[in-house]
Image: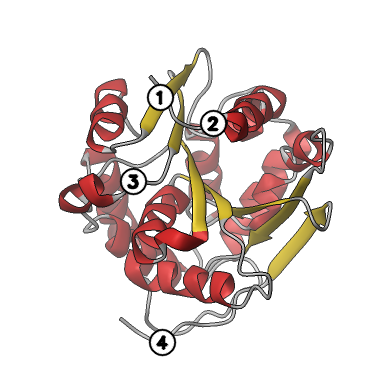
């Protein structure tokens, strides 16, 4: 592991509300939550104090030459939690790559994570989708250190659905294309070798898994296995949605997330 880097944090919602920290997916950025945040900002009662970070190498975060294993990404997020002056435990929301990071953060700092919400969660053991993406990225070469824009577009379109607003998808493609190819490869190397299967029994944080049944990255069997391995998890299958349900139907994801705050433990 390398030392942590300082991550940019975008904050919205109501100061003093229940703290929620959102971790984006592979080559996305904090802006990947822009469709969801308005639905969360109007939460009843004291509301939510919402924060979203750019993970190392993504968005406006530093892009060092090394430190892209899941443990490194998680250490950066732990540093964000440790810097909170209130010391409050947060609801940690992670999409895809962010789900791996969120699990690692909860294992490292269980007292600082009140609940987990894992959206399009990656499985405990890397599957063919994850290792295949890594291998394809290494095969691209990309001498100009940029992944070809057409390839980036296929990647983003292939993991969501036509229901994503066109302008939002364009912004997502632009954000991903801005990530250097070396970061794409390094992060893919990290998630394609990450395996937390042996640790999940010790992750006692209440956990909600939100998975779209058209997700091409992980299967329902993998989601059910993940839910079964986590002591306090429940799985909600979202019909008709893909790997980025918070892009495709943010209102529905917000309802599920807000309901989980009332009682994240499942059946």
Q: CA distance from mark 3 to mark 4?
A: 27 Å
Please tell me whether mark 4 sits on a helix, a strand or a loop.
loop
Label 2 secondary element: loop
Instruction: Describe the element under mark 1 as helix, strand or loop.
Output: strand
Q: Are marks 2 and 1 in contact (CB under 8 Å)?
A: no
Q: Nearer the viewer, mark 2 or mark 1?
A: 1
State the residue position of label 1.
235
Left/right placement of residue 34 relative to residue 145 reads: right
Q: Residue at x 31, y 31 (%)?
A: 227
Horizontal and vertical percent for residue 251?
72, 25
Instruction: Report the mark closest to the observer, 3 or 1.
Output: 3
> Is residue 62 shown above or below 89?
below
Name the element at disc 3.
loop
Cβ–Cβ under 8 Å for marks 3 and 1 = no
Q: Position of residue 160 (x, y in %)?
A: 54, 31
* Residue 194 horizontal side relative to residue 258, left or right: left
Q: Earlier in the sequence, mark 3 or mark 4?
A: 4
Q: Which image quadrant: the C terminus? A: top left
Q: Residue furthest left?
A: 198
Work out how far the residue at label 2 is from the one at label 1, CA to CA, in angstroms.
20 Å
Q: CA distance from mark 1 to mark 4?
A: 34 Å
Cα separation, mark 3 vs mark 1, equals 15 Å
Colour treatment of the image: secondary structure
| Mark 1 or mark 4: whose residue is earlier in sequence | 4
Residue indicated by mark 3:
204
């Amino acid at each position: 592991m390398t030392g942590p880097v300082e991550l940019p944090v975008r904050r919205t919602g109501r100061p003093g509300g229940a703290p929620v920290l959102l971790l984006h997916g592979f080559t996305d950025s904090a802006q990947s939550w822009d469709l969801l945040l308005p639905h969360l900002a109007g939460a009843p009662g004291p509301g939510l104090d919402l924060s979203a970070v750019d993970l190392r190498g993504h968005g406006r975060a530093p892009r060092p030459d090394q430190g892209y294993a899941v443990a490194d990404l998680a250490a950066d997020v732990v540093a964000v939690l440790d810097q909170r002056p209130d010391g409050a435990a947060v609801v940690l929301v992670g999409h895809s790559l962010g789900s791996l990071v969120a699990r690692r953060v909860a294992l490292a700092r269980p007292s600082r994570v009140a609940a987990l919400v894992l959206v399009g969660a990656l499985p405990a053991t890397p599957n063919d989708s994850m290792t295949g993406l890594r291998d394809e990225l290494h095969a691209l070469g990309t001498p100009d250190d940029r992944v070809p824009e057409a390839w980036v577009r296929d990647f983003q379109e292939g993991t969501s659905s036509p229901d994503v607003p066109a302008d939002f998808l364009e912004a997502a493609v632009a954000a991903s294309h801005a990530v250097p190819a070396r970061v794409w490869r390094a992060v893919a190397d990290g998630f394609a070798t990450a395996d937390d299967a042996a640790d999940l029994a010790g992750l006692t944080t209440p956990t909600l898994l939100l998975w779209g049944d058209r997700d091409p990255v992980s299967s329902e069997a993998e989601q059910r296995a993940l839910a079964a391995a986590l002591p306090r998890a429940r799985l909600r299958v979202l019909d008709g949605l893909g790997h980025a349900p918070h892009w495709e139907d943010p209102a529905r994801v917000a309802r599920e997330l807000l309901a989980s705050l009332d009682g994240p433990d499942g059946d």
